[in-house]
Each structure stands twice: as structure tokens, then as C-alpha cells.
Image (cartoon, grey):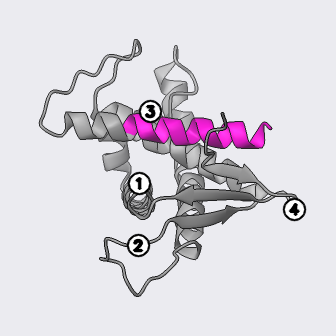
Amino acid sequence: MSTLRRFTPQPDGMLLGRFEAIEADLLGLVTTQLLEMLHSGSTDPQLAASDGVFGRLLPDAYRDDDEAAAEFRRFTATGLLERKAQNAQIVLDSLAAGEPDAATPDSEDRQPVTVSVDPDAVQAWLRSLTDLRLTLADRLQISPDGVVNLATEDTPFLRELYEWLGMLQEELVYAIDV
């Protein structure tokens, strides 16, 4: 029995990714939100210092030396956030190029979206999926042992989103490892 693969390698080195329209919309939405957050963090150092998500996205280079870690972050954080934003933009561009019919965005009969991901963009996709999962892990207050500590009405949806992004990441890794 064969299973349907979301990402399939092509002879020219490209990967084709197939998403249901609602999945493409969701991935586009969360990636846009990630991009906005990254831009906010790169333009507002106080926000980046106070929001725990940036601690997950930009972990300390020196865990035993707070002063050295702060100095390292001062020189590298903006550049790292900009590269993360570039990765997110590549994902958004791939999704936008794959839209089947922009004339019917609200139709329930929308066709699946096929995106082409070139070999260079694969790494951007993997990095963005990681950044999305790290952001959700922070928002869900997931502990190192995997326990979700957030208990709100949004928790089940955010947990499902976190797991779905992990599945996408796994499928993408599998496709490039074939």
C-alpha cells in the first residue's frame, strides 16, 4: 500500500508540495504572522529582549556567561532575525506562486495548491517550519519534556497546529532524503 506524499521530488531537483487550499491558507497566515513578529523584533530590541519567543528563536551562545551571551546577541540578533524573515518570505512566495485560482478565494470548491520548491528554498522552508514550531512551543509553554502548560480555549488548536507543522517538517525531510 502506498501513501500519498505531500512533497514529491522531481527529476530536475525541484520538490512539488501539494496542499489543500485551507492548509495553504493556514500556512500562509502563520508564516505571515511569523514574518511580522520577526520584523517587530528586529526593529524593537526591547520587544526582542522581553518576549520569550525570541529566547527560543535566538538561544544564548554562552549559557554560563550572561555578559558574553548579551554581547554576542547584540552583534548577531538583527542579522539572524533578518535571515529568519528572508526564510519566511521564501515560504510565502512559494505559496503565492502556487495559488491555483485567486479569483475564487472564498469558494468551498477551491482546488488543492501545488507549490514548487527549488533545492535552495528547501532549507528556507525547513528553517521557517522550525521557527514556527519554536514560536508555538513558547506560546504553548511546552516544557523540555514535551508537556503543554498553557490551558486556554485556544490550546487544542495551537497544539494541533504545532503537531501539523512538525508533520510537514518530517515530510519535507523525508522527501529530500529519498
Q: CA distance from mark 4 to mark 2?
A: 28 Å
Q: Quadrant of the N terminus?
A: top right
The picture places residue 109, in percent across and down from the top left corner, at: 37, 72
Q: For mark 1, what is the residue?
A: 34
User: Considering depth in this image, is 9 or 52 the residue closer to the camera?
Assistant: 9
**Viewer-nearest of discs 3 and 1:** 1
Does 108 appear above or below 134? below
Whether 85 is drawn above or below 101: the answer is: above
Closest to the camera, between mark 4 and mark 3, is 4
Query: Which of pointers 2 and 3 lies earlier in the amino acid sequence?
Result: 3
CA distance separating discs 4 and 3: 36 Å
Whole-Å distance between the Cαs marked 2 and 3?
36 Å
Q: Are marks 3 and 1 in contact (CB under 8 Å)?
A: no
Kind of residue indicated by mark 1: Leu
Earlier in the chain: of badge 4 and badge 2, it is: 4
Residue at the disc numbered 2: 110
Residue at which label 3 appears: 56
Extent of the magenta region? 162-178
Image vertical order of residue 95 relative to residue 124, above or below: below
Q: Determine the residue positioned at 41% across, 54% down.
A: 34
If you read the primary sequence from the N terminus, does the residue marked by circle 1 or circle 4 appear first? 4
Residue, far front: 1
Prevalent SS, magenta region: helix
Q: Which residue is mark 4?
A: 12
